[in-house]
Image (tube, helix red, strand yellow):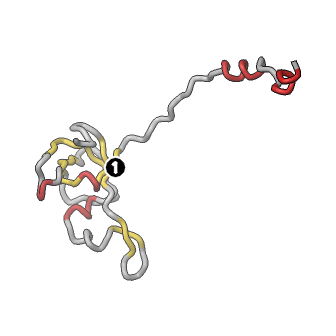
Amino acid sequence: MARFAIGEEVKISMPRAKNKRGVVGVSVMFTTSPEAKFDGATGVVTDINPRGTYGIPLYLVDFAGHDNGRIGIPWTAQWFREEWMVSGKRPQPIAQPQDHGAAEGQAQTSNPREARTN
């Protein structure tokens, strides 16, 4: 089942690891892959290939129309694995309704010591 839908905004996040100097960055296993150039870029999913390479679903992400100037992406669309993408939406805080019924009910409970003496 696909975690991302067509039209959803996503951010590319390649696997992180320390290099020989101890600096954390894109894992050395992926630094030479074309997808590593898109690390941190934001785009929109435009197509899904459920039977990608080696049976891994692939998502076509279009970066046109987004401000990715600081990243310097080489082209505007690229196929990515699901584990290299993070949802671009920030979770909205859920407003919980206030329930005053529990506090009112506790004020009316009897004292257990009084209940035993009666």
Residue 117: x percent and y percent? 88, 22
The residue drawn where x is 35% and y is 44% is: 88
Tell me the kind of residue under disc 1: Val
The N terminus sits in image quarter: top left
The image quadrant that residue 22 belongs to is: bottom left
**Nearest the eye: 34 or 109:** 109
The residue drawn where x is 17% and y is 51% is: 58
The image quadrant that residue 48 belongs to is: top left
Residue 14: x percent and y percent? 31, 61
The image quadrant that residue 38 belongs to is: bottom left
Check disc 1 and report the residue beneath it. 86
**Nearest the eye: 37 or 15:** 15
Sort mark 1 into few (<14), some (14-19) or many (20+) by Cα contacts within 10 Å: some
Residue 5: x percent and y percent? 24, 38
Residue 86: x percent and y percent? 34, 49
> Considering only vertical position in the picture, is 66 above or below 25?
above
**Residue 4 in view:** yes
Furthest residue in direction bottom, as rendered:
20
How many circles with numbers are drawn on the protein?
1
SS category of the residue bearing label 1: strand
> Considering only vertical position in the picture, is 33 above or below 76?
below
**Residue 69 in view:** no
The residue drawn where x is 77% and y is 17% is: 108
**Nearest the eye: 9 or 105:** 105
The C terminus sits in image quarter: top right
The residue drawn where x is 22% and y is 71% is: 32
> Considering only vertical position in the picture, is 85 above or below 44?
below
